[in-house]
Every structure is written in structure tokens, then in C-alpha cells.
Image (cartoon, grey):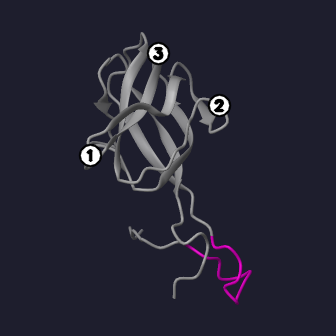
């Protein structure tokens, strides 16, 4: 299987041959791993080894805990260039004690960043186990669905 990346906003090729319809943004998923959910300082969340960095304009839709630990954590961001830390930007007091998906309507606060951002974690209540999961997000469309060619 080939691996690829793109900077494109995708448009369906079937439903609108005139390029009139809103093209929208694709939904993406980023795997994450927290080695120790007891860390009280903001620590970088891993993406199978390296730090997990979300692109500028990312809006988190949900967080799924796949491998449960204990307690709860705050998932936040730290600006890639600015270093500005927002410890609970993604989720405040996210329970990691059982496998579950938390949607934007509950604990997750999805705000678009103007710069790339490291995903961070800190303990909210006592816990010490590793946690793994998936952050689902999309990147805002700077052209608001309009054609750029």
C-alpha cells in the first residue's frame, strides 16, 4: 500500500461536475499513546514514537480511548512555534478508565489552532497506566468551500 500526504481540500468527483457544491474537509484520525497517565506536568503525547503534532487549523471532533488506563487526563496543546501551552484545549478531565469515544458535544473542546500544535497530556485524577487511542479531527477550509483554480 502506498503512503501519501496532501495539502488539498477534497471535492467529490461524482455529485457535482460543475464545482458549485461546497467541497468540505476530510475527516482524519491520529493515533496517540500516553506512556504514563500519572504525569502532572504537560508532557508530549506520542504518535507511535514521535510527538503527536496536529496541523494548523485542526479542529478535534472526538477522542477515542482504545487501551484504557486509570483515572482521567487533560489533553491539551502547545504551539509548535510559540510554545503557548493550553493544557485542556482538547479535553478537560477526560476519563481514560475505560474504552470509550468522547464527542465534541461533551468533554472535548474543539478549537482551531492558527499554528501547528503538539498534543499534550497531564493527570487530572490519579492514574498511572499507559493509555492509547485515536483523535479524530478535520482541518478548517481557508477558502470556505470555494474553488481555488
- Disc 2 crowd rating (10 Å Cα; few below 14, some 14-19, many 20+) is few
Instruction: State the SS at label 2.
Output: loop
Instruction: State the SS at label 3.
Output: loop
Spatial CA span between label 1 and label 3: 32 Å
Residue in the image at 49% along x and 50% along y: 112
Is label 1 or label 3 in front? Answer: 1
Q: Are marks 2 and 3 in contact (CB under 8 Å)?
A: no
Magenta segment, prevailing SS (helix, strand or loop):
loop
Instruction: State the SS at label 1.
Output: loop
Q: Is residue 68 visible?
A: yes
> Of the residues under marks 2 and 3, which one precedes in the sequence?
3
Was residue 141 drawn as part of the magenta stretch in this picture?
Answer: no
Spatial CA span between label 2 and label 1: 28 Å
Residue ID for mark 2: 106
**Residue 27 x %, y %:** 57, 57
- Residue 82 is labelled as 1
Spatial CA span between label 2 and label 3: 20 Å
Residue ID for mark 3: 70
- The magenta span reads 10-23
Question: To which quarter of the image does residue 52 belong?
Answer: top left
Counting the numbered discs, the total is: 3
The answer to which of 69 and 40 lies nearer the viewer is 40
Residue in the image at 32% along x and 17% along y: 40
Against 122, residue 109 (above or below) is: below
Question: To which quarter of the image does residue 11 belong?
Answer: bottom right
Against 26, residue 123 (above or below) is: above
The answer to which of 115 and 47 lies nearer the viewer is 115
**Residue 39 x %, y %:** 31, 19
Quadrant where the N terminus sits is bottom left
Is label 2 or label 1 in front? Answer: 1
> Of the residues under marks 2 and 1, which one precedes in the sequence?
1
Decide if residue 72 is on the left or right side of residue 52.
right
Amino acid at each position: 500500500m502506498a503512503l501519501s500526504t496532501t495539502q488539498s481540500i477534497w471535492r467529490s468527483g461524482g455529485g457535482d461536475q460543475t464545482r458549485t457544491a461546497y467541497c468540505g474537509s476530510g475527516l482524519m484520525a491520529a493515533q496517540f499513546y500516553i506512556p504514563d497517565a500519572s504525569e502532572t506536568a504537560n508532557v508530549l503525547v506520542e504518535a507511535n514514537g514521535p510527538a503527536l503534532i496536529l496541523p494548523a487549523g485542526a479542529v478535534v471532533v472526538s477522542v477515542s480511548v482504545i487501551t484504557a488506563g486509570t483515572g482521567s487526563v487533560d489533553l491539551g496543546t502547545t504551539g509548535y512555534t510559540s510554545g503557548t501551552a493550553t493544557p485542556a484545549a482538547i479535553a478537560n478531565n477526560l476519563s481514560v478508565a475505560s474504552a470509550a469515544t468522547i464527542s465534541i458535544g461533551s468533554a472535548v473542546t474543539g478549537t482551531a489552532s492558527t499554528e501547528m500544535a503538539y498534543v499534550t497530556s497531564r493527570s487530572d485524577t490519579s492514574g498511572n497506566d499507559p493509555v492509547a487511542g485515536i483523535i479524530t479531527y478535520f482541518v478548517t477550509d481557508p477558502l470556505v468551500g470555494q474553488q481555488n483554480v
